[in-house]
Image (cartoon, rainbow, N blue to C red):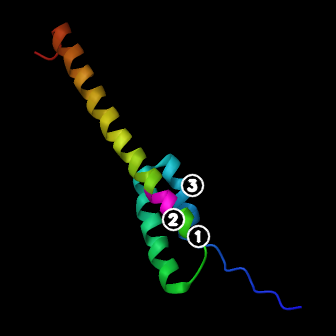
Amino acid sequence: MTTNPVPRTNTLALIGFIAAFMIPIVGVVLGAMGRKQITSSGEAGRGLARAAIIIGIAGTLFQVVFFAVWLTLMTAGLSQSGLLG
């Protein structure tokens, strides 16, 4: 009985997937690097790399929008209180 060995999961894709939830931009970068390695080495993990990129982009966009809204509200609050000028 011959069994085909299961290809190893790409480490960068796995770490990128995990990082996408904590530091989204790192997830995007590691997911892209992992995806490039997967195409050249034939390792498994293409779905993890793709998910890391998608989740990382969504998380980064959320952080940018959140910061813009926070900055706007903070500026408006400080301006209204007379501390900003």
The residue depicted at 52 percent of the width and 47 percent of the height is: 21
Q: Residue 60 in the image: x percent, y percent? A: 37, 47
In the rendered image, residue 59, in percent from the top left (x then y), is placed at: 42, 45
Q: Are marks 3 and 2 in contact (CB under 8 Å)?
A: no
Identify the residue under disc 3: 18
Residue occupied by mark 2? 49
SS for dot 3:
helix
Callout in the foreground (3, 1): 1
* Marked residue nearer the N-terminal end (3 or 2): 3
Residue at (34, 44) in percent of width and height: 61
Label at residue 45:
1
The C terminus sits in image quarter: top left
Q: Give the mark, 3 or 1, whose residue is nearer the N terminus.
A: 3
The kind of secondary structure the magenta stretch mainly shows is: helix
Instruction: Name the amino acid, label 1.
Output: Gly
**Hey, what amino acid is under mark 2?**
Ala
Left-right relation of 26 to 45: left
